Amino acid sequence: MNAHVRFTATEQRALLDAELAGQFPDARGRFGPYGGRYVPETLIPALERLEAGMREHLHREDFQREYTDQLRHWVGRPTALSHAPRLSAAWGAEVWFKREDLAHTGAHKINNAVGQALLAKRLGAKRIVAETGAGQHGVASAAACARLGLPCVVYMGAIDMERQAPNVGRMRLLGAEVVPVTGGDQTLRAAIDEALRDWVSDPSSTFYLLGSAVGPHPYPYLVRELQAVIGREARAQCIERHGALPDAIFACVGGGSNSIGMFHAFVPDEQVEIIGVEAGGRGVKLGENAASLSYGWPGVLQGCYSLLLQDENGQIHETDSISAGLDYPGVGPEHALLLAAGRVKYESATDSEALAALQECSRLEGILPALETAHALHGAKRWAALNPGKRLVVCMSGRGDKDMPTLQRTILAESRS
């Protein structure tokens, strides 16, 4: 558990029982002690309209029919549950992948993007703004907007634009305007700040399509609901294939959308271990990693109270990770709750560990995973060594084509020298 936040066993059980009973988020948008809505007054009406519209439409039969139709016939769901036979032999455990890398645009992000874009149309939005780090949410947003005929502006940190150049080109080909963010840390955090500023300037006709399970209420809940298809499918596929649930499931955690989508359906299954793997970067010191659940303190960032990487004065610190999609100093409030409740274990993998896992998966399984996913793969390998013969499922959150510029500077450069 996080070194700075402690809950008694009784408190943990109460939080978990409330989560299992569907009491979170509460009327204030809180997941236990975390979450909420900490934004300028100018954004309150827009968030209230979004919440009201979400509650009116999200679970209505006609919306779900339209959403499911897009997922099935355009996104390509259900995604496969694939056995990894050579990794299984190497690790001494039964390894399976939930293949979000096979979804349209190459990652789980499309589940949320098309759902929010459909909601935006129902709410009368005239344009979409989005942020992106690794570029996958930007690509998914651009694709969803093209599909539904909505103008799309994507904010992306200048550093991320350099290390994710293939996705920048994809967004532009899909018709989106990509705006480089040169202020702040020039990564995902700065991109979110700019998208929020754009939204504040025109909250009535602009819809902010937030890409992760972070930010002010109702976004953590909305994104969770749209990504929960991952875990529902994986759970049903495991029962159909094996007649039983897996012993453990794994996913990488940055802001936390693929992981909360994978975890949510399994939270009531207390016999299933749930492990989230954060970006350990270069080390354990502040500024050397992006592991908010491992090293963070409670605080407010971009409209939400959660665990953050901050110094003793409460100043949000820059992060460091080879993975653009995990390079963020906070985490979604439901993850902070699941940590507090003791239901999910969160650990980290370093840059070098993630790169090694990426190479091993590529060479043994013929699947090039995203650098984000590679962190989860390392966590799964570590668990398998302690649990020989057990069955595990890793959320293969995205494919690694987008990471080729980074891989050419690291792994491929080393192989040539």
Image: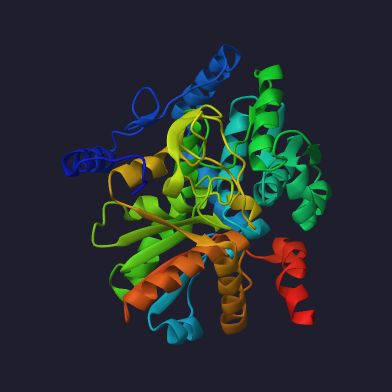
In the picture as drawn, the residue positioned furthest to the left comes out as 10
266, 148: nearer the viewer: 266
- Horizontal side of residue 91 vs 400, given as left or right: left
Q: Position of residue 231 (x, y in %)?
A: 41, 56
- Horizontal side of residue 153 vs 375, given as left or right: right
Q: Quadrant of the C terminus?
A: bottom right
Q: Position of residue 318 (x, y in %)?
A: 62, 41
Q: Residue at x 24, y 57 (%)?
A: 270
The image quadrant that residue 113 belongs to is top right
- Horizontal side of residue 56 vs 16, given as left or right: right
252, 299: nearer the viewer: 299
How was the colour assigned to the protein in this rendering?
Answer: rainbow
4, 275: nearer the viewer: 4
Q: Is residue 95 above or below residue 9?
A: below
Q: Position of residue 341 (x, y in %)?
A: 28, 44
Q: Residue at x 65, y 60 (%)?
A: 106
Q: Residue at x 36, y 46 (%)?
A: 3
243, 407: nearer the viewer: 407
Q: In this figure, what is the number of numbered marks?
A: 0
Q: Position of residue 286 (x, y in %)?
A: 54, 45
Q: Is residue 261 above or below residue 309?
A: below
Q: Residue at x 49, y 81 (%)?
A: 87
Residue 85 is at least partly visible in this image: yes
Residue 149 is at least partly visible in this image: no
Q: Is residue 88 above or below residue 167?
A: below
